[in-house]
Amino acid sequence: MRSLRELLTADAFYDDVFSIDFEEEKKRGIRGVIFDIDNTLVPHGRPSDEKTRGFFASLKDIGLVYCLISNNDDQRVRPFAEDVGAYYVCKAGKPKKSGMKKALAEMEVSEPEALFVGDQLFTDILGAKRCHIRCLQVRPVDESTDPPFVAFKRMLEKLIMRS
Ligand SMILES: [Mg+2]
C-alpha cells in the first residue's frame, strides 16, 4: 500500500500552468488533462482571461482534450468551462475518486492517459493520486484570494511539504 507521503507528493512541480511542457506530456502517452480552476488557472473566483483562453487553444492545437474539475458549484464552473471550451465536473468533492472518474469519462480517456494539474495537496494531489493519475502541482496563482478555509488548509500543506 502506498504511504500517505506518496499520496500527497505530486509527480512534478511547476511555477504555473504555462511552464508545463504539454507536447512532452503528450509524447509520454497523455491524451487528456484535468485542471483545477481556482488558484491553478486564475486567482480564486476570477473568470477566464485572454491568457487562459489562449492557453487552452494551444492545448487543443496539440490535440489534447481537457476537463475542469472543481469542488465549487455550477455557477462558478460552467461559465469558465464554456469560455475555454472544456468539459467540466463541478461539486466534485475532491479528493473523492468519483469526481475524477467522471472527468475521465467525459474526456473518454483512461487513468494512464490522463494528467492532473492542481494547486492543493489535500484536494487535488490526493484525489489524483488515489486514482493513479499522473499529477503536477503548481504554485497558487494568488494566495491572497484564498477563502479562509483554503488559507487554513494551505498552512497545513506548507507544514507537510517542509517535512
Ligand atoms: Mg485550487
Image (spheres, rainbow, N blue to C red):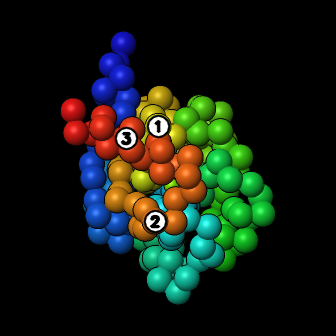
Q: Which residue is mark 3?
A: 157
Residue at figure coordinates x 65%, y 48% from the top left: 71
Residue at figure coordinates x 42%, y 46% from the top left: 154
How many labels were placed on the picture?
3
Amino acid beneath label 3: Glu
Q: Position of residue 107 (x, y in %)?
A: 61, 52
Horizontal placement of 98 versus 144: left or right? right
Pick whichever of labels 1 and 2 is earlier in the sequence.
1
Name the disc covering residue 122, or none.
1
Tell me the CA gap for discs 2 and 3.
16 Å
Q: Position of residue 108 (x, y in %)?
A: 61, 47
Name the disc covering residue 152, or none.
none
Circles 3 and 1: CB atoms closer than 8 Å = yes
Residue at figure coordinates x 65%, y 33% from the top left: 98
Q: Secondary structure at mark 3?
A: helix
Viewer-proximal residue, 61 or 76? Answer: 76
Residue furthest bottom as drawn = 50
